[in-house]
Image: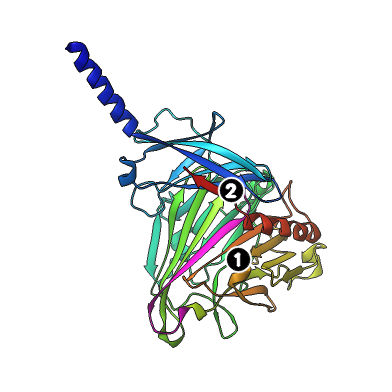
Amino acid sequence: MKKTVTMWMMLLFCGMASAQTKTLDVTVTNDWKEDKVDEPVVVKLPDAKKLGFEVKSVTVKCKGKEVPCQLDDMDGDFLPDEVFFLTDIKDKDTKTFEVKLSAKEDKKGKEVESRIYTALQLKDKGDKHPDVLRVEAPGKSYLYNDIFMHGVVVESEQVGYRIYFDDRQVVDLYGKKRSRLELPVTQFQTFKEQLSEGYGLDVLWVGDAIGCGTFKDWKKGKPEDWTEVGVRGQRVVTTGSLRTVVELYDLGVRGEDDLLYDVHQYYSLYAGHRDLKVEVSFNPTMGKKPFEKKLFCTGVQKVGAAADEATRKGHKPQGFVKKDGLAASWGCDYPDMGKKEQWEPEAVGLAVYVPKDYISDTTEDNLNYLFVVQPDKDYNLDYYISFCADKEEKGYHAAKEWFASLEDWKDNVSHPVKVKVE
């Protein structure tokens, strides 16, 4: 009898244990003609009701070898929604991964060195710059100088970006010599001593231009800032060692014919990448005018167009905008017009890729190469931003080689891997 009870308890324990784990077989296929390196893979998780437990840890393996990954809560309900990892995969190849979900926290898991940095911080009297997950304010308020680094920042080993918390919402660029994380040290405000130690710096002065891939309203045939806004905000959606996603949002934007709408911009940066994925969604809140006819714009500025020959350092301003979805420029100018004595002119290459279905028109003005874009029937659109700095030790150093790389880049992001979960 004692043996029977013991056996029954063991079986019950095993059943409970097995009910607290689930293994997903994930097949990743690269049907593109080129190999992919650090290719992002997203595995959507079943919700807790279907699983029967809350996922608190995950292990990803390929052929028995553990693959670094992260669990991400994408909707803010404190429950994980996605498993994210990166993989190298050959052209026309398929790889199979074992994704093991568990209700137990992995306190003994192997610590992975972060390849991503994300910060949304407040400026305070004690210079401690506390981290926050969200900043939200009335549209007429001015918090630009109250946010440390003037807005949310994201960084991979290759590049850094920040997005200003103001009506311009400019995408600003941080270029560096070496492949490493630097913003925790330089904080987008590199000093001369840090430059002499090999650190990078802010490499682009935007002024009244569109910068690199900044998303703008389109009114009366030109880009417009987000001035007529009820509420504006920035938040960190999710971040980890391999991926970060941040959001900009403008609520109660007043458009033509008093149409009110909300704009949500999501920026995703992956470890090993210099490009930034942008996903924009809209939500009309009032008005009968067909919202899908509303136009917006993005593009790249003409770097060095107004600079003199000495400032350009032999880098002739060049660029283009094409109906196939590519816009790019190359040039050299001071990265901060107010601190010319501190920073030398910097040569950079900028690029934006917009899928053709979103393009309403292409144009240019004295400052920019521009796409006029409109959302799809579901009020969504997406595009990609990329840039390089001439100061990179392993990068692009002339317009010709930068422009030559962009067709492959466009094809690469247009052909993401296919993910099948069983």
- Segment colored magenta: 273-291
Residue farthest bottom in this picture: 257
Classify residue 141 as left or right of residue 63. Answer: left
Q: Position of residue 264 (x, y in %)?
A: 45, 66
Task: Work out whether residue 340 can be spotted.
Answer: no
Instruction: Name the residue that disc number 2 marks.
Output: 156
CA gap between label 2 and label 1 equals 18 Å
- Is residue 225 found inside the magenta-colored segment of the image? no
Kindly give the residue lying farthest to the right in the view shown.
314
> Quadrant location of residue 101?
top left
Which residue: 60% across, 61% down? 384
Residue 249 pos. (x, y %): 44, 66
Q: Is residue 259 left or right of residue 5?
A: right
Q: Secondary structure at mark 1?
A: loop
Q: Which mark is residue 213?
A: 1
| Residue 389 x, y percent position in the rendering | 70, 55
In-front residue for pair 197/253: 253
